[in-house]
Amino acid sequence: MTLQTPNKLKARPGEVTAVLRRILAENSHDYRWTYVMVITCSLIVSGTTAFTAWIMAPMVNQIFYERRGDAIVWICAGFMAAFLLRGFAGYGQAVALAKIGNNLVARYQKRIFDHLMKLGVGFFNDTRSGRLAAQVNENVGGIRDLLSLTLTSITRDAVTLLGLLGVMVYQDPVLSLSSLLIGPPLIWAVVYLTRRVRRITRESVLINSRLIGAVQEATQGIAIVKAFTMEDELSSRIGKLASDAEQRSNKIARVSERLSPISDMLAGFAVTSVIAYSGYRALVLGQPPGAVFSFITALILAYDPARRLARMQVGMERALVNARMIYELLDLEPKQGDAPGATKANFTTGEVRFNNVSFRYVEETPVLQDLSFVAAAGKMTAVIGASGAGKTTLVALLQRFYDVESGTIEIDGQDISKVTKQSLRGSIAYVSQAPYLFEGTIRDNIRYGRPSATDAEIEQAARLAAADEFIRQQPQGYDTPVGENGATLSGGQRQRVSIARAIVRQAPILLLDEATSALDNEAEARVQQALTKVMEGRTTIVIAHRLSTVVNADHIIVLEQGHLVEEGTHASLMADPHSVYARFHRIQGVKGLGLVDDSAPAETSVQELETQDIAGSTP
């Protein structure tokens, strides 16, 4: 399941309570004293608001009706104290809630990233990275909003409303009962609107994540965009997404804000009815106006917390949608965890053995079938074959990016499925055919291979990777920022930095997946010479299309549609002119077409190769 898969839009009974209880269970212990402060400040705000309504009765009766001068001092002092207390308490509450909210966002961002790092490669193959990052960034605020809305609504608005209702009942029970008649229609309106908001909010989240993800992908692939003149097409596509996002946001605003005119109309009806009736009692029955003024003040002050409580349910639905989507991600179980009782790998020589390994990404298409071979310890084993033959899959299985369907993979006699993935991958240095550099400097990117590496070791690794010369020509040398995915470096330079990263790792097993494919002939020769020194004493598995990179391999295996069809040394395989390896060598040497079977005309060979690509390619 990916985050883009729509879930049921209707919340289950008690789901808000369940999600809120989970948030509190995970975080309340760390915030308990801040919660105490928030609740205390909220109670002060609620109490002073109710006091302001209550004191209106003695103010009107004693100052304006009875004309008592001595009452002015204590009534003014009471008003001043109430406003001062409410001001400071409101400030303290707002700061404390902001602190909790900001910490929650940071906490869940860290937690989500840690969880993403535990998920398998398959999850990321099915999920667009830009869209995932955008959606997580948009959803994480739901946790904060759900908690903040609950705290402010319960501890401030609900308590304030109860206090003001108490003042109203105390001053005039009959009028209090009549004013509460607005409750049922307001509740009906809230229930109706929350159902509408729930569906629209989820649609809005998904569309916004697609929009931000599309912008991110377009900027990352700007060279391709320019080269293929895709600007107009992408602008049209992103413009449509932006319009869709705008329409959903406008719809949310229209539906959410419908509560305002409804509540205003009901509140206006209640207030005008109370004023008319109380005016009749004052003029006809001659009752003192203080109680009526106090009642009306309490009624007007009660309008804001009542409206916020009504709107809270709408806001809670929006926050709930976001919180649910965050927990959908956090609740994903890694499909490929460490086996129960997995031990730390303890590799000594680094011999790699594939025993009848079969694997498929999808049920209908096998990629490797009963593959068996041995990569001798301290030796170089080369793997060749047409695209789609399963070479890169072999490397992925060795690193346990996926688990084998059947058979076993052993290193020094240890089944890699029974050791921890971290210790397994810590024993392997990997160079992919698509070099990837991270934000930071050149030195930072090399150090990712081994965080404890010294600057001297980093520079030594760069020299072995034939990268030291061009690095020192950069404006800041090793401390030059590389830009997004190494945009400031050429493809060959990025590849040499990634090779240096693998060298500094000092692992017993070295995997090179088309490691020199991005280099020119001169740079390739220099790197190959450097790698020859690096590979001494290490078990090296090389995936290559260029046969010039494998002629000196100690052992060569040839794959064809997931099967091992030949193995041996360059000399032994070339001794048979009809061998697949020999045909590959002739085709590459004469026609320059790459690893294509020359048993048929060139057109047919290319067509067959493309068929293999489609049938055996990874997702």
Image (cartoon, rainbow, N blue to C red):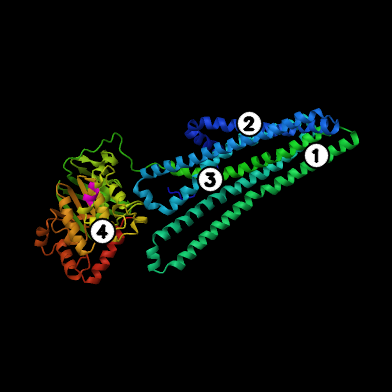
Q: Residue at horizontal 49%, vertical 39%?
A: 104
Range covered by the magenta-colored residues: 456-461
Residue 389 in picture, x, y percent from top left? 25, 57
Q: Do the residues labelled 3 and 2 touch (CB within 8 Å)?
A: no
**Residue 55 coordinates in the image, percent (x, y):** 75, 31
Q: Of circles 3 and 2, which is in front?
A: 2
Q: What is the magenta segment's predominant secondary structure?
A: helix
Judge by depth and name the residue closer to the eye, 429 or 607: 429
Name the mark on residue 321.
Answer: 3
Q: Distance between the residues labelled 3 and 1?
A: 40 Å
Q: Residue 61 is drawn in which quadrant?
A: top right
Q: What residue type is labelled 1?
A: Val
Taking the image as shown, residue 360 lies to the left or right of residue 65, namely left
Q: Which tag is nearer the camera, tag 4 or tag 2?
A: 4
Task: Nearest to the eye among marks 1 and 4: give it.
Answer: 4
**Separation of marks 3 and 2 at Cα, in angstroms:** 30 Å
Q: Can residue 288 be seen in this view?
A: no
Q: How far apart in space, not on screen, are marks 1 and 4 (Cα)?
A: 84 Å
Question: What separation in Å lies between label 1 and label 2 (alpha carbons)?
Answer: 28 Å
N-terminal label among 1 and 4: 1
- Among the 4 quarters of the image, the one containing residue 560: bottom left
Amino acid at dot 3: Val
- Tell which circle, 3 or 1, labels the residue nearer the N-terminal end: 1
Q: Name the residue under label 4.
A: 470
213 and 54: which is toward the camera: 54
Q: In this image, 210 relative to 444: left or right?
A: right
User: What residue is drawn where x is 20% and y is 40%?
Assistant: 347
Residue 146 placement, left or right of 271: left
Q: Earlier in the sequence, mark 4 or mark 3?
A: 3
Disc 1 crowd rating (10 Å Cα; few below 14, some 14-19, many 20+) is many
